[in-house]
């Protein structure tokens, strides 16, 4: 640590005004503040500082995402070996290495494109590099199917960073969650590589790992996709056609987007976020409550197969849990007032189930529900603050009357 | 003469009806998924603005100010009907693609705007040129949007394949979002972005 600090202090003059490398000042600044908490403080006004600045908060979210990422890698390998009928005789490391070879390029592309744009913009506007993309860059590879081509991922990331974030003024100013915009762009622009039955399981060998031929009973549809098109009773199966239970969905060895399948890995991330106080339990909790209550409502109507899925299955299907834990709680784009967080979360959960049940064309309602509520978050905050002001005004008025009468 | 040429060139950039005055956005989103309907629409609007400007300018001293909107509507409606019938007669497939939007030229804000702001107070020749200029300014933007959307959304321009088959074999895919109206809005925004950054005097404080 000491050596790193000394090295940074030694090269720093090169990057300052008039130094040899002053044009890369924002890049150097970005890395320095990423490695060490900056020692600058606010010059005027009263501020309360704790030791956690926004780069440290972002790092915490990335740490919370790591269980989902690692499990995602393992699951990609597991699905591949399962559908090619070579699961017997393959070790844990075979599976994991195959998955890593599939997933890591996506992480690299997402970070390279997103951070590249951030660096260029920061250099252009002569501002510091902002840290918001640290989290988005990790979220993006986790919410796409494993067969999503890398160039499409790059295009979508660039689109989202430019049009959902930079045009609004960069980190902290965006109206929409950048990762969700990336997914929405992919979903509408390249539906063939984002939805359907053939993109959720990697079937070909990667870097000489894996291989073999796909077994005959291969289906490849996600449980959510199966539920959306089900006729009669909903029977969900895994990638080779064996039926799966609620417990399987909890563990997560099922086809789906890379990071969303294992609810246990997501729960570990949720605990990390809640213990460190990065995410609000109010938002997270009310998303689940909203989803569960809406599912119960549809259960009581129960005219189509997908309406009859039990509420706990609804919460485990698709990206519901992942969205609730990592995306609805985004501090920038969700509601900021305490009561607003309940309303925001509840509506996200409610609309997710509404979209999922009433429009089988878009089985993944989480993405659209979050984007919709992102738009309304400032309005919810305004309404909550205004209601508080009115209540206090009324109280002051009543107290004044009492004092006069007394 | 330089004044007349100004009347034509001004609406192309500095006073463009779509990207500076932000008029006629609706049809700019609706008909630009392909380049061909965009060009036909651009020509139709140019013809209608030019001739309605000319007619209203000729009548400008005889129209009572109280009923001028009705007179303008009658003139525009007549011209739009003529254009619509000509398209149906000679370009039936494009006419079907444009469907209701040819008829809706009558509600295009650019038309009424030019009639009210220019034709009622100017002589026939400048009015005619102003109509052509505004129609072309509108058409220019339409054609840019149409070209971008067709190229990226379908890989073609005017129906001819531009992006080679080889690219598709290597995994290139058309962008489905380009066909949908939201992307037209974003393309308009990008054009405005580029235009404003080149013309500092148009930037709002």
Image (cartoon, rainbow, N blue to C red):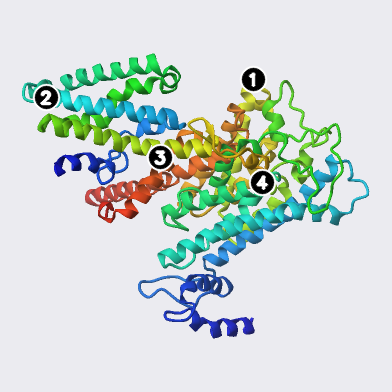
Q: Real-space Cα distance between discs 2 and 4?
A: 61 Å
Mark in the foreground, 2 or 4: 2
Labels 2 and 3 within one chain: yes
The residue closer to the viewer here, A259 or A98, is A98
Q: Which residue is mark 4?
A: A149
Which corner quadrant holds the C terminus of chain B?
Answer: bottom left
Q: Chain of mark 1?
A: A
Mark 3 nearby-residue class (10 Å; few <14, some 14–19, many ≥20): some
Q: Chain of mark 4?
A: A
Q: Residue at x 43, y 44 (%)?
A: A380
| Separation of marks 1 and 4 at Cα, in angstroms | 38 Å
Residue farthest to the front, as pictured: B1
Q: Chain of mark 3?
A: B
Q: Label 1, on which residue?
A: A303
Q: Is residue B82 left or right of residue B55?
A: right
> Dot 4 surroundings within 10 Å: few (below 14), some, or many (20 or more)?
some
Residue A245 occupies quadrant: top right
Tag 2 residue: B58
Q: What element does badge 4 sit on?
A: loop
- Residue at 30% x, 28% y: name it: B45
In percent of the image, x 56 and y 70: which residue is there? A34
Camera-near label (3 vs 1) is: 3
Sooner in the amino-acid sequence: mark 1 or mark 4: 4
Question: Which residue was labeled with disc 3?
Answer: B144
């Amino acid at each position: 640590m000491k050596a790193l600090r000394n090295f940074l202090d030694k090269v720093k003059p090169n990057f300052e005004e008039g130094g040899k490398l002053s044009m890369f000042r924002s890049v150097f600044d970005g890395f320095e503040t990423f490695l060490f908490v900056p020692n600058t403080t606010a010059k005027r006004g009263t501020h309360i500082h704790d030791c956690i600045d926004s780069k440290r908060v972002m790092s915490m979210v990335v740490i919370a995402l790591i269980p989902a990422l690692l499990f995602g890698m393992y699951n990609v390998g597991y699905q591949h070996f399962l559908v090619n009928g070579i699961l017997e005789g393959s070790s844990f490391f075979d599976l994991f290495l195959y998955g890593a070879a599939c997933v890591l390029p996506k992480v690299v592309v997402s970070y390279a494109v997103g951070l590249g744009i951030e660096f260029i913009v920061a250099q252009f506007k002569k501002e510091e590099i902002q840290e918001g993309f640290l989290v988005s860059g990790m979220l993006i590879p986790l919410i796409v199917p494993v067969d999503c081509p890398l160039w499409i991922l790059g295009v979508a990331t660039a689109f989202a960073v430019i049009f959902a974030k930079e045009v609004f003024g960069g980190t902290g100013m965006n109206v929409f969650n950048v990762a969700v915009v990336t997914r929405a762009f992919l979903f509408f622009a390249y539906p063939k590589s984002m939805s359907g039955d053939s993109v959720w399981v990697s079937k070909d060998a990667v870097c000489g790992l894996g291989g073999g031929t796909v077994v005959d009973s291969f289906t490849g549809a996600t449980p959510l996709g199966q539920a959306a098109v089900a006729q009669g009773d909903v029977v969900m199966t895994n990638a080779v056609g064996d039926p799966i239970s609620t417990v399987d969905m909890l563990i997560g060895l099922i086809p789906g987007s890379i990071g969303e399948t294992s609810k246990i890995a997501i729960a570990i991330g949720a605990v990390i976020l809640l213990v460190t106080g990065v995410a609000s339990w109010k938002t997270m909790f009310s998303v689940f409550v909203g989803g569960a209550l809406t599912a119960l409502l549809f259960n009581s109507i129960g005219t189509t197969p997908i309406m009859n899925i039990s509420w706990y299955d609804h919460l485990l299907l698709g990206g519901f849990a992942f969205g609730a834990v990592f995306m609805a709680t985004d501090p920038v784009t969700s509601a900021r007032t305490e009561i607003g967080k309940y309303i925001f979360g509840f509506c996200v959960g409610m609309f997710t189930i509404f979209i999922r049940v009433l429009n089988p064309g878009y089985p993944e309602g989480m993405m659209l529900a979050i984007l919709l509520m992102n738009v309304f978050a400032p309005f919810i905050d305004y309404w909550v603050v205004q209601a508080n002001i009115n209540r206090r005004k009324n109280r002051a008025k009543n107290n004044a009357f009492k004092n006069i009468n007394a | 003469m330089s004044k007349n040429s100004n009347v034509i060139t001004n609406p192309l950039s500095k006073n463009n009806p779509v990207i500076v005055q932000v008029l006629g956005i609706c049809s700019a989103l609706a008909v630009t998924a392909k380049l061909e309907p965009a060009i036909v629409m651009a020509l139709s609007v140019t013809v209608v603005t030019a001739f309605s400007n000319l007619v209203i300018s000729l009548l400008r001293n005889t129209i009572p100010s109280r009923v001028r909107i009705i007179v303008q509507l009658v003139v525009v409606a007549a011209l739009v009907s003529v254009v619509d019938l000509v398209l149906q007669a000679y370009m039936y497939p494009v006419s079907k693609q444009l469907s209701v939007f040819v008829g809706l030229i009558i509600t295009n804000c650019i038309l009424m705007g030019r009639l009210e702001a220019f034709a009622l107070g100017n002589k026939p020749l400048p009015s005619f040129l102003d109509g052509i200029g505004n129609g072309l300014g509108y058409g220019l933007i339409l054609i840019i949007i149409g070209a971008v959307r067709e190229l990226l959304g379908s890989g073609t321009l005017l129906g001819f394949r531009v992006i080679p088959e080889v690219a598709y074999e290597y995994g290139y895919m058309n962008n489905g979002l380009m066909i949908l109206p939201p992307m037209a809005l974003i393309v308009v925004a990008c054009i405005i972005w580029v235009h404003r950054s080149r013309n500092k005097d148009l930037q709002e404080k």
